[in-house]
Structure formats: structure tokens, C-alpha cells
Image (cartoon, rainbow, N blue to C red):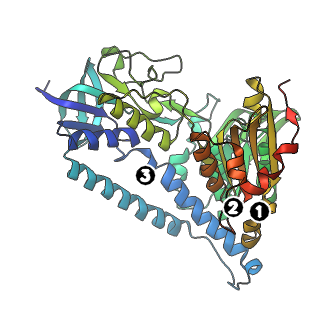
Amino acid sequence: MPQTERYAVLIVGSGEAGKYMAWTMAKAGHRTAVIERRLVGGSCPNIACLPSKNIIHSAKVASFAKRAEEFGLELGSASVNMAGVQRRKGKMVEDLIQLHLDRYKASGAELIMGSARFVGPRTVEVSLNGGGTRVIAGERVFLNLGTHAGIPDVPGLRESQPMTHVEALDVDRLPEHLVVLGGGYVGLELAQAFRRFGSRVTVIEREPQLASREDSDVGAALLELFGDEGIEVLLQTEVQQVQGRSGQKIRLDCQNANGRTVIEATDVLVAAGRTPNTAGAGLDQTGVELDERAYVRVNERLETTAPNIWAMGDCAGSPHFTHVAFDDFRIVRDNLTGGSRTTKGRLVPYCIFTDPELARVGLNESEAKSRGLEYRVAKMPMGAVLRTRTLSEPRGFMKMLIEADSDRILGFTAFGVEASEPMSIVQTAMLADLPHTALRDAIFTHPTIAEGLTVLLSSVATTEVRRAA
């Protein structure tokens, strides 16, 4: 075994939390090593958030092209070139990787490309991508291991070599008939994108609605959207067996309330949840415990069960969003310098980048009822916001939950064009503990989606209180 190299800071994984920890620690004068298996900067700039939004925007442009006459344009025939779509995405990813490499160089952190496995409490053996091994020990260790797409245990599914979001975002051909397994945010975003590029698309979801964690009105609105765009949706449907090979010809035997259904397609995309990258990492050598789902067990300060080892991001069981991983980094960073920050009570927003967007912060009605809360609901169609008329995008609605016996905002959901804009405003108000009346009485620029908040909240005083069943 090579001689052990000693660093003040050892970071396993260069995702959102890991890279910011590396740059921060190195700039502060700590000798820092970052071990990254493959993706410089983690999944977000390479195979997830940013590439997917790049592809989704290309699909939106394709949609606009098909609607050109509606906007007074004469384009003639418009066809999709998937190779061109991939070139645009690839150029963005290349630029982002170089940006990361430049930041590593400027910070002084050492980026080591290879696979790390713990061989001691704070010591890893690294199988270098270029050949050879190194053994590295850190006084403080930060785990940023991430997750990967899980493949359900369905007979024949794994053997069919289905796509996950990773392969789907690299497809330079147009699938003739794409079956998407899963009606969560990854499945919804990519299903719509490929439909707009020209694929026939079928979505299979086990739950009674799409976006199963959202209120029923959200699920119904998404179902209507997909129906209007020609996407077939099978709800409460279980895939029981898969035959064939994705990319060629595939057959899915399914079961639902109507009996047995057989779907024949060309491609399958699995978007059915995530699995932490903890298996095979040698964590049993460190004193770091895993929970029942194989995520790293952490406390509210993101400290593991082993001294001087922290976990951040997806592998720590944090909500699987880049913006949450960044906040994990901030919590650990601040606590290392005497702070007292925790993950408790974080107000986490999210947005599904379907078109239109689905954005939410705080509680929805289902969650409020499960907590036994009494609340009022202000709700209106997006078409009541004049900005949507200028864009010819009136689909959707926005709604706010307000505590029954006060003016405190409990949560906000918007399904519509630019939905993330008013969501961010409401989040800011909630962080500042502002009453809903502060937004109701605010002066927002006209015409924006944000000014819809004043219309939404104008009738709260006469809204009936809803109580948990």
C-alpha cells in the first residue's frame, strides 16, 4: 500500500456541497484534497439540473415553433435535430466543467480523479482514473457521495438496459415511443420534453395521480396538461414484467384496475426514485452509521456518528435539490467557525420545470390536514393575471394557505407560466414572518406574474376556514 498522504481536509465527492467546502477550506489555508470519481462539479452541471433544463428549453423552443402561427409568425416546416440539441447542451456542460476547474486552481484545492474507498476511520484508498493508487488521510472528512437513479425490482427491467435521466439527456436520436416509469419531477419534465421533440410518450405511475406528494388539484392539472399535449398517462398501474431491450423493441406487461395491459415501445426511461451512493464506500471502516434506507445517519448539524466526519447533500438524506446541498455546506461551514446552524425548520422551495412550471414553498393542503391545522385557502386561475394574456399562457392556478386565526402564510403553490417568480416572493415573506396582508397591499410591477399575488389575496377575509378531517 502506498505511503499515507495527510491533509487537513478530505472531501469525498465534488458535488454542490463538496466543491464549495473544498474552495472555502483551501482559500482559508487548509491543505485540501477532493476525490471525484467522474463528474467534476457533481451531477448538477453534468447530468442533472442544468443539462435537463437546457434540454427542456430546447423542447420549449420546439413547442413555440409549432405554435408560430398563433404568434403571427410564418416559419414553414420546423423539424427537430436531436444532434443539434445535444451540441447545445454539450457546449454548456464543457463550459461549466472548465469553470469548475478554474475555481479549483484559484482556490488551491487539489482535485483527484478516482474512486475512493475508506480503509480506516478517516483514511481512503483512491484508485486513480489514470492508473495507480493513493492513500489519503484527513484531519476532517466531508462526505458528499450523492445518489443515483434506482431501478425497481421488476422482472426483466434491469436486463432491458433502460435509460435513466443520465442516458436520456445524452440521446442524440428521437425515440419513436418512449415509456417513462414514474410520475415525479424527473419523469414529468423529460416526458414532456420528448413529446415536444416528437416522440410518442407513455407515463406509467403507481400512485392515483401525477406528482403524488402534491394536492389533488395539482395532479389533475398536470394530467390535463399531458392529455392536451398527447402524452398517454396510466395511473395506479404496476409494471409486472419487461421483455426486450430499450432502444430497440420492448414490451411491458402491466396491471391496473382495468386488468392486464401490454405496452409495446422502443425505449424505456426509469424515473422511479434515488439510491444513495454508500454501498462499497467502506464506511464500515469509519464508524459512520447508515440509516434503514442506506443514507448516512446525521444529526441536525450534519455530523455523522464518527468524530470529525460530516455528510452533506443527497447522501445525508437531505432533500434532493442542489439548493439544499448548498445550504448543507453553509450549515457545516458556519458551525466550524463557531456558529450554531441546523437543518431544523428549513423552508425549502422547489420547482418542477414542466411547461408551465409547478412551484411550491411551505405546506400544501394535504400536509396541513395531516398536521391537524385549520387554514384558509386563497386560490385563483392564472388567467386572472394579465401577464399570462400577453404570453398566451393562461393555463394553471395559484393558491396560498393562510393560518385560520392569524394572517400567517403557511404555504404557496403555483402551477403556471413563470410560477417560480411569485413563489420566491412568498418564500421571502415567509422567512421574514410577514403576514399575507403585506403582499396583498404591496405594489408590484405591471404586468408581471408577481402582481397576481395582490389579486389572489384580495378576498382572503371572506374565505371559509378549512379544518382537518
> In the rendered image, which residue does mark 3 sit on?
45
Residue 377 x %, y % = 81, 41
Regarding mark 2 in the picture, which secondary structure is present there?
loop
Which residue corresponds to mark 2? 449
Task: Tell me whether circle 1 and circle 2 mark residues in contact (CB < 8 Å).
Answer: yes
Any part of residue 76 in sight: yes
Residue 337 image offset from top left, x and y in percent: 29, 31
Which mark is first along the chain, 3 or 1? 3
| Residue 248 visible in the shown view | no
Distance, label 1 to label 3, CA atoms, is 34 Å
What secondary structure is found at the residue carrying circle 1? loop
Classify mark 3: residues with Cα within 10 Å, few (<14), some (14-19) or many (20+).
many
Residue visible at 81% across and 48% down in the picture: 379
Number of other residues with Cα within 10 Å of mark 2, as a class: few under 14, some 14 to 19, many 20 or more: many
Report, in whole angstroms, how far the alpha carbon at label 2 lies from the one at label 3. 28 Å
**Rendered image quadrant of residue 442:** bottom right
Q: Which quarter of the picture shows residue 24?
A: top left
Q: Say which amino acid is labelled 2.
A: Ile
- Kindly identify the residue that appears in the image at 62 percent across and 56 percent down: 421
Q: Is residue 441 left or right of residue 118?
A: right
Q: Residue sitting at 38 percent across and 19 percent down?
A: 304
Q: Quadrant of the N terminus?
A: top left
- Left or right: residue 313 versus residue 107 is right
Secondary structure under tag 3 reads: helix
Q: For the residues carrying marks 1 and 3, which lies nearer the camera in this image? A: 1
Identity of the amino acid at label 3?
Pro
The numbered disc on residue 385 is: 1
